[in-house]
Image (cartoon, grey):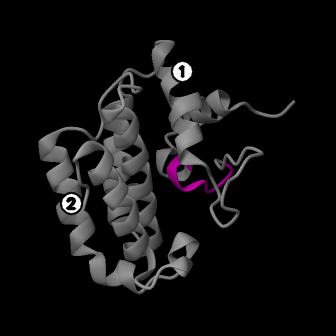
Amino acid sequence: MSESVKELVQRALDNDCLTDLITGRNGYAWAPDRDFPVDLPTDIAYVIRNGLYPVYREGHHSDIPDRFREAVEDLLKGTPEEVWYAYNFCWNELFFELGKKAPFVIVNYMWYREELRKAFRSRKEELSKSFVLVGEFEKEGLWGQMMRSNLGMKARFGVSLL
């Protein structure tokens, strides 16, 4: 029997492999059968909604917000691709938080959004030159994709990560 997304999240939490869960590396990818870009190893929105939130609601790992902030901080120190994965996780989590679908808050603190904004902007040049993952479709690479998705967040909720 294959592993459910909740089991995948639980395993990542138990093994302290949250950066792998966010990036879909080392056996922590989740790509369900649906409209999903094949160049991305994991559907983080699905993982958050159908794995992370249920695990949290069941009373497992009350430290999830702090542990995911730490994982994001680790990714922000990595390659441009890892920075993009951090952004992608934060964008999806913030979308759920602002839409009142999240059982906790990770991203939607003004101080934390400002820290993220500074970290993302400090890597703009590198991100603009990276044409992997979804960056291959943008003139400004991963930064262009981040800017485009950020516009949607601003339009819908009046909030920016960049």
Question: Residue 4's image quarter?
Answer: top right
Q: Position of residue 121 (x, y in %)?
A: 22, 70
Q: Is residue 115 left or right of residue 60?
A: left
Q: Position of residue 7 (x, y in %)?
A: 66, 29
Viewport quadrant of the N terminus: top right
**Above or below, 54 relative to 34:** above
Is 54 in front, or is 35? 35
Q: Amino acid at mark 1?
A: Pro
Q: Amino acid at mark 2?
A: Arg
Q: Is residue 89 left or right of residue 155?
A: right
Q: Which residues are magenta?
A: 21-27
Q: Residue at x 60, y 54 (%)?
A: 24
Circle 2 — which element? helix
Q: Is residue 84 left or right of residue 97?
A: right
Secondary structure category for the residue under label 1:
helix
Q: Identify which residue is drawn at 53% across, 32% down.
A: 49
Few, some or many C-alpha atoms within 10 Å of disc 1 (few <14, some 14-19, many ≥20)? some
The numbered dot on residue 117 is 2
| 40 is higher (above) or lower (below) than 7 | below
Residue at image mark 1: 54
Q: Which quadrant, please, contains the C terminus?
A: bottom left
**Relative vertical location of residue 57 with respect to residue 73 in this rendering, above or below:** above
Q: Residues within 10 Å of mark 2 (few under 14, many from 20)?
A: some
- The furthest residue to the left: 111
Where residue 56 sits: x, y (%)? 46, 21
Residue found 33% across the figure and 51% down from its top: 153
